[in-house]
Amino acid sequence: MSVKIRLARRGRKKQAIYDVVVADARAPRDGRFIEKIGTYNPNTNPASININNERALTWLLNGAQPTDTVKAMLSYRGIMLKKHLQIGVLKGAISQEQADAKFGTWLEEKDAKIVSKSDKLAASKADVRAKALAAEVAKNQARLDAKQAKEDEQKALLAAAEAANNPAPEAAAEEGAPEASAEGGEAEA
């Protein structure tokens, strides 16, 4: 019986989530399996990979063959490196302490890369939000300016129409001035 480490699909349409399972190669994709060793969610950014490292390493050392996708995920998590180092320890090429030290340094570097990618994604998302907010503020200001200009134009048109309908106050003052001088002249006499 050949044993595979592969993905079993679950979740709803267009929102797939996968279980990482150890199964007989003859079993159907979503059918019977021997053991569930983790989950994979490609819908998040970066993709969420949760695998029981010790169980996966045990199955790999016992001869289970991962599929291409699962092999990439195991490499991403460092399990394939750990298997490689463990085989070196079993052959006597390196000691267990050296293997653990190499794996520890690799794991620290990988965690730093993951954190930097998450920070970079969060920063770009915040930058996009800030640009969208600035564009919205500018658009709202342009609308307010256009509305204010329209109101000023209407006020000017109303003032012009009112001025055309009513005689000018200067003309009324000129007409009233000769009368006042005539009256003033009579008052003096």
Image (spheres, rainbow, N blue to C red):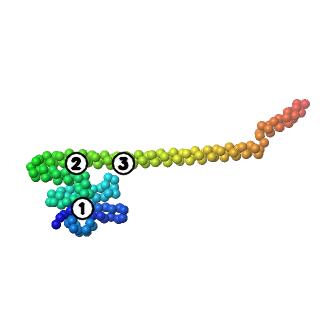
Q: Amino acid at mark 1?
A: Arg
In terms of secondary structure, where does tag 2 sit?
helix
Residue lying at the far right in this picture: please name it.
Answer: 189
Comparing labels 3 and 1, the label whose residue is closer to the camera: 1
- Please tell me which residue lies in front, 1 or 108: 1
Question: Residue at horizontal 36%, vertical 64%?
Answer: 13
Query: Which corner quadrant holds the N terminus?
Result: bottom left
Q: Residues within 10 Å of mark 1 (few under 14, many from 20)?
A: many
Query: Residue 107 location in percent, x, y?
Result: 22, 48
Q: Earlier in the sequence, mark 3 or mark 2?
A: 2
Residue 6 disc label:
1
Residue ID at (46%, 48%): 132
Q: Nearer the viewer, residue 40 or 1?
A: 1
Quarter holding the C terminus is top right
Q: Quadrant of residue 165?
A: top right
Disc number at residue 122? 3
Q: Secondary structure at mark 1?
A: strand
Relative vertical location of residue 171 with respect to residue 19 in this rendering, above or below? above
